[in-house]
Amino acid sequence: MSAMTTLSRGDIVNIRRDSMMQFLLFYPLILGLIMRWLIPWVATGLMDTFDITPYYLFLASFFGLIIMPDLAGSLVGLLLLDERDEKTLTALLVTPMPITTYVVYRIITPTLISFVGILVLVPLIGIEVPPLGSLVVLALSASLGAPIFTLLLASLAKNKVEGIAIMKGMGVLLLAPMIAWFVPEPWQWLLGIFPTFWSAKAYWLAVAGESYLWVAAVGAVYAVGVVWLLLRRFRQGIYQ
């Protein structure tokens, strides 16, 4: 716990001195408030020309569920790249703190931020909100994907500048559930190769009152598997 506290203090210092990280931290709250007002306003404005209400579920799942793991994972990924640039990771290898403790902290942090963020963001947007019990399950399944974004940045980027560029490329993980919405079954299941698909699909099923637990479970197991593979690559990079 002492090690976790020390790492947390370091993160707070890094966030306080970086305006981009501060923006990422508060962006979900800003986004939720905007969507809560904007979606009904657009629906009313387009009432006579285009009905967007059939897309409420799509909008709620994307802005409430899918985008949060990306933001949380990217935020922690940038913090990790900061530490790499400052040679903090190299210094950790000669300190009493086990490297495993550091790695576990870097996995838990984006997962927790994402989980809490989803529980706040979905009700804040206020459309197509599943029951609380279902929302907790969906938030847990989706938030397990947050470390994927963190470890992708850590594994692919050599420094923070490259990390910002890679963040744009990781947008393909957000496109998968958006594309799946417009693809009929059973073909949309092919997009299950992307981890973000499973939590979005589970959300759609939960709101529709259909069986969703197995989809959320598959998504969670798949995300953990991807994290494990990326973690092996990340650990190898630390010792190089």
Image: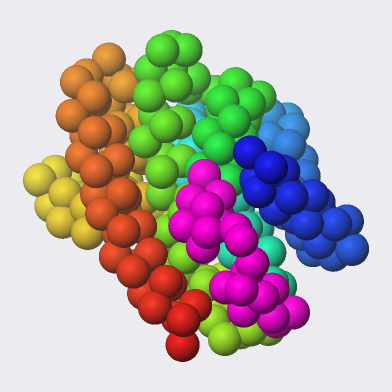
Colouring scheme, one of rainbow, by chain, secondary structure, one colour: rainbow
Magenta highlight on residue 126: no
> Which residue appears farthest toward the right when viewing the image?
17
The quarter of the displayed image where residue 42 is located:
top right
> Compared to 239, does 179 lie above or below?
above
Front one among 14 and 18: 14
Q: Quadrant of the N terminus?
A: top right
**Residue at (41, 43) in percent of width and height:** 144
> Compared to 194, does 161 lie above or below?
below
> Compared to 217, does 130 lie above or below?
above
The location of residue 137, given as percent across then percent down, is 38, 24
Disc tally is 0
The quarter of the displayed image where residue 4 is located:
top right
Left or right placement of residue 224 versus residue 163 in this view: left
Front one among 223 and 228: 228
Magenta highlight on residue 106: yes
> Which residue appears farthest toward the left when viewing the image?
186
> Compared to 98, does 135 lie above or below?
above
For the record, the magenta segment spans 84-108
Question: Is residue 42 visible in this depiction of the protein?
Answer: no
**Magenta: predominant secondary structure element?**
helix
The location of residue 174, given as percent across then percent down, is 44, 57
**Residue at (59, 30) in percent of width and height:** 116
The location of residue 162, given as percent across then percent down, is 61, 84
Question: Is residue 193 visible in this depiction of the protein?
Answer: yes
The location of residue 193, given as percent across then percent down, is 22, 59
**Residue at (73, 37) in percent of width and height:** 29
**Residue at (43, 72) in percent of width and height:** 234
Left or right placement of residue 183 versus residue 172 in this view: left
Left or right placement of residue 193 versus residue 74 in this view: left
Front one among 102 and 227: 102
